[in-house]
């Protein structure tokens, strides 16, 4: 599949490639908060919008190690029946790796989806050599390896393992003064545990991958909001 990608750094945009499906890539600060409303439900960890919608997926951060060495992390996104590898192939722990100490990355899918099309995520960690999948956590059914946060929810009070930043540290731009999550009505955050299935183990710190989903009426609506957010930081 050939993709058309708009890459936006600061306030400059460039188009690279062409095709039937478009993804808009942004890298930079978190969204500025605004008065936004979009109705959706969380059903068995799936995001299920109540009207037709567009979606932006943001990787806020990732941190997971084995023996002090970073483990690759990849992710795929499914909307309805279609799967999207928005950040490189989810089956390629080299070019699809999200545990690379980068700034937050934001991708707008250039498509309007149908009411009721569920958004689900599949996050994978890999052995340090990238030879095999270590652990996969999905949101298409309830999982103990996933925390789902909406506006006003408390962040799990868990220290980052082996000196890593905690989930709370990753989410600091999205927190109220009382430590609860400060999101718009059209946003949801996922915290993934990709290292341990024994959640009593201190290595189970739920910041192996931190993802934000933002909904809008159309891709253009989401892009206009991103440009307004960037202007607010200039």
Image (cartoon, rainbow, N blue to C red):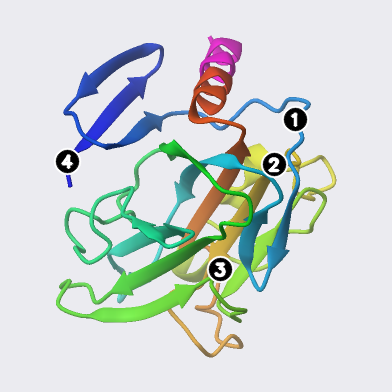
**Residue 206, which numbered label?**
3
Question: In this figure, which residue is indicated by the disc labeled 2?
Answer: 186
Whole-angstrom CA distance, mark 3 to mark 1, is 28 Å
Q: Quadrant of residue 102?
A: top left
Count of numbered labels shown in the rendering? 4
Q: Nearer the viewer, mark 1 or mark 4?
A: 4
Q: Nearer the viewer, mark 3 or mark 4?
A: 4
**Residue 18 can be seen in this image:** yes
Look at discs 3 and 1 and give the one toward the viewer: 1
Residue 36: mark: 1
Numbered disc in front, either 4 or 2: 4
**Residue annotated with mark 4:** 2
The answer to whether marks 2 and 1 mark residues whose Cβ atoms lie closer than 8 Å is yes
Q: Are marks 1 and 4 in contact (CB under 8 Å)?
A: no
Could you tell whether 140 is left or right of 44 in the image?
A: left
Instruction: Identify the secondary structure beneath mark 4.
Output: loop
Distance Cα–Cα, label 2 vs label 1: 7 Å
Secondary element at tag 1? loop
Q: Position of residue 69 (x, y in %)?
A: 27, 68
Span shown in magenta:
227-234
Point out the tag, 3 or 2, that comes first from the N-terminus: 2
Whole-angstrom CA distance, mark 1 to mark 4, is 33 Å
Residue 156 appears anywhere in the view = no
Query: Where does residue 38 sit, x and y in percent of width and height?
Result: 73, 39
Where residue 113 sits in the image (x, y, percent)? 52, 45
Q: Residue furthest front?
A: 114
The quarter of the displayed image where residue 36 is located: top right
Mark 3 or mark 1: which comes first in sequence?
A: 1
> Which of marks 1 and 2 precedes in the sequence?
1
Q: Are marks 3 and 2 in contact (CB under 8 Å)?
A: no
Residue located at (61% from left, 88% from top) = 200
Query: Which mark sits nearer the N-terminus, 3 or 4?
Result: 4
């Amino acid at each position: 599949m050939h993709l058309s990608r708009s890459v936006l750094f600061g306030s400059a945009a460039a188009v690279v490639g062409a095709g039937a499906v478009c993804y808009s890539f942004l890298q930079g600060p978190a969204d500025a908060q605004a008065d936004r409303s979009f109705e959706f439900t969380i059903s068995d960890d799936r995001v299920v919008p109540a009207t037709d919608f567009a979606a932006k997926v943001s990787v806020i951060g990732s941190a997971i190690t084995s023996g002090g060495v970073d483990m690759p992390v990849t992710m795929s996104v499914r909307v309805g029946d279609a799967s999207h590898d928005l950040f490189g192939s989810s089956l390629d722990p080299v070019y699809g790796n999200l545990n690379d100490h980068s700034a937050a990355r934001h991708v707008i899918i250039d498509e309007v989806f149908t009411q009721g099309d569920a958004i689900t995520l599949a996050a994978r960690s890999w052995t340090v050599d990238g030879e095999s999948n270590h652990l996969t956590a999905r949101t298409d059914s309830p999982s103990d390896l996933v925390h789902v946060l909406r506006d006003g929810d408390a962040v799990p009070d868990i220290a980052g393992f082996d000196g890593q930043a905690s989930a709370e540290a990753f989410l600091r731009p999205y927190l109220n003064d009382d430590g609860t999550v400060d999101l718009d009505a059209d946003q949801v955050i996922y915290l993934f545990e990709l290292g341990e299935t024994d959640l009593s183990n201190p290595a189970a710190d739920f910041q192996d991958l931190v993802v934000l989903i933002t909904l809008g009426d159309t891709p253009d609506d989401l892009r206009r909001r991103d440009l307004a957010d960037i202007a607010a930081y200039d």
